[in-house]
Image (spheres, rainbow, N blue to C red):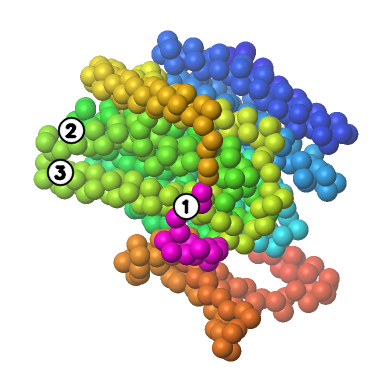
Amino acid sequence: MGIYFFSIVILLLGALLSVVIKDDNKKLKSCSICSVLSTILTLIPAIYTIKTGMPLQISIYASPLLGYVDIVIDALSAFFLIVISIMSSLGIIYANGYMKPYLNKGMNISSHCFSLMLLVISMMLVVTAQNALFFLIVWEIMSLSSFFLVIFEGEKKEVISAGIKYLVYMHISMIFILAAMIVLNAQTDSLRFMDYLAFMQNNGAHANLIFVLAFIGFGIKAGFVPFHNWLPEAHPAAPSHVSGIMSGIMIKTGIYGILRFLLLIGTPSKIISYAVLGVAVISALYGVLYAITQHDIKRLLAYHSIENIGIIGIGIGAGMLGLAYDNTFLAVFGFTGGILHILNHSIFKELLFFAAGSTYLKTHTRNIELMGGLIKKMPYTALLFIIGSVAICGIPPFNGFISEFLIYAGMIKGVPASGISLFIVLVLSIAALAMVGTMAMLCFTKASGVMFLGNPRGVDIDNVSEAPATMIFPMTVLAFLTFFIGMYSQYFISYASIPASMFTNGVDAVGDLIYLFDFVGNIGCYFMLFLAIAVVILVIRYVLGIGKKTERHSTWGCGYNRPNNHMQYTASSYADLFISTLKPLFKRVSHIKKPKDLFPKEAYYEQNIEDIEEAYIVKPLIMWDEKFLTKFERIQNGNIQQYILFGLIFLILSVIGMIYFGG
């Protein structure tokens, strides 16, 4: 445990150095060095715990209020520590290149660097703290530090609006988590998770209530529908390295909280399990549906975070149903697939956000309708984005395939051994997951094609250049990981099965998964064979072409000899046929300027899709709240005597209340 604490101290040192160092260019470099060193140290106890299955634990007496604070690295915590440490390091390295233009403008990034390091520290403590009050403290630090990162460009009105919305949602999340902790503390008179375990497993009614409160609280952080509204606003507002860390890592702390409380209750009830699976399926479908409609590339990726949180939730929900129905196969495959998808999503989602950040940095727009032809100017970024797109669509041999395949396999194998209700639910869930994969391919062929192929639609790409090496390097590492995990997925399935076995009552998950290893190993072999054949063909083509003059011609234009940027698909037209079949699920907002003359100088039509929950629930509530609060404006009249009077009245009422209720 000493190594783990030392890794946190190094991160804290990086945070302090970012404040002390005067040269802004060196602030992020010092943070990067400290982050990499911390990652190396963190991996030592985390990998030890995963390999041996032996948890590391220390109890520290903090204060009379906190009592003993248990810091525990078990298999679940170790898995999350590995994800947090590696992904955050790559994000901080990427920030060195991304923040360069802001430094050139003379912006001070001390508070940004400090908040970035503090976010990493708090996430590491969240997944290891097993004292309720200490957990809530570091959870709040995580929310506040990420809030300051979101509002980095606070001079923009939309950024402040997104930041405030994020902060409000995080504190609603905190209320539900706090309520769950208060109920536990009231029943056990303890702040330690180990004392909650016995109570939760022996009190089913209380356990269900506490889990529901915790699921809502942690579900808001994770981005489950209908608690997702903060996510499509905060991710586009934040700098891209922050978006990658928040989407790839931070929202997974919500998943961690759900899994930790699930460990406390043991075997979940059937109704709770069905509810979790239902929310997850809706989240996956809702997220990918709205991702297809987006023109802002970071907003598109934010909705895909909701989709993938839904996929993780489907795995967890299927695993819970396996426990509730004593279906070991469904439980093992569901939890293993869900946990492995936590790792996989963190990798390809960071890659996609980083690539999106590179295009934004060079084109100064997030609107994919204005892009096009960028593959000519940013070939590495384009290739890396396409790799991330293939991975997120669950196409082999990249990493997104294997975790989704495990979830599929668990549900398909669980169908024959199910009663009628579970049979129907599993079949519908399989169909929904298949639909999600199909829509994801539609979305990313749209995004990749419109951004990188064809002709420029609105952005002048003549002055666009490739992203710097400090941004390409972490993206390349992430792209390699998507490929490596996909090719050698049997080893990563084994590691994911270790934390999964904590939920399956000690059943050896590897034993049930072992027969899959040959199958996933063959996928890698077949792909390597395909790659070898492709290389041989290219070599033969090169050899045969030596000494021959090659002429290049433009692609046949189907009779058009003067193509322009209007003679190609836009993002809207590409997806319109699909979207038009689902009209009731969207609220369309159109902006049109009709042509007035025979040869009009200007005319345009733009259509945006608004989130129906935002349009019909959130905005009306905000408007009602504003109308209600305006009735109290007369109290704010600037008269200090009246303010003192209000305070005095409140004090008198408080004293009367204390005397009355105290008696």
CA separation, marks 3 and 2?
11 Å
Task: List the residue tagged with mark 1.
Answer: 555
Q: Amino acid at mark 3?
A: Phe
State whether residue 303 is above or below residue 457.
above
Task: List the residue tagged with mark 2.
Answer: 413
Q: Which residue is at a point 35% across and 68% down the rendered structure image? A: 580
Disc 3 + disc 2, Cβ < 8 Å: no
Q: Nearer the viewer, residue 160 or 432?
A: 432
Q: Amino acid at mark 2?
A: Lys
CA separation, marks 2 and 1?
48 Å
Q: Is residue 118 left or right of residue 298?
A: right
| Label 3 Cα neighbours within 10 Å, binned few <14 / some 14-19 / many ≥20 | some
Mark 3 or mark 1, whichever is nearer to me: 1
Q: Is residue 92 left or right of residue 318?
A: right
Where the C terminus falls, by quadrant?
Answer: bottom right
State whether residue 360 is above or below residue 46.
below
Query: Which mark sits nearer the N-terminus, 3 or 2?
Result: 2
Q: Considering the numbered disc 1 on the image, is that residue within a helix, a strand or a loop?
A: loop
- How far across and how far down the image is residue 573, in percent? 43, 65
Q: Nearer the viewer, residue 165 or 241?
A: 241
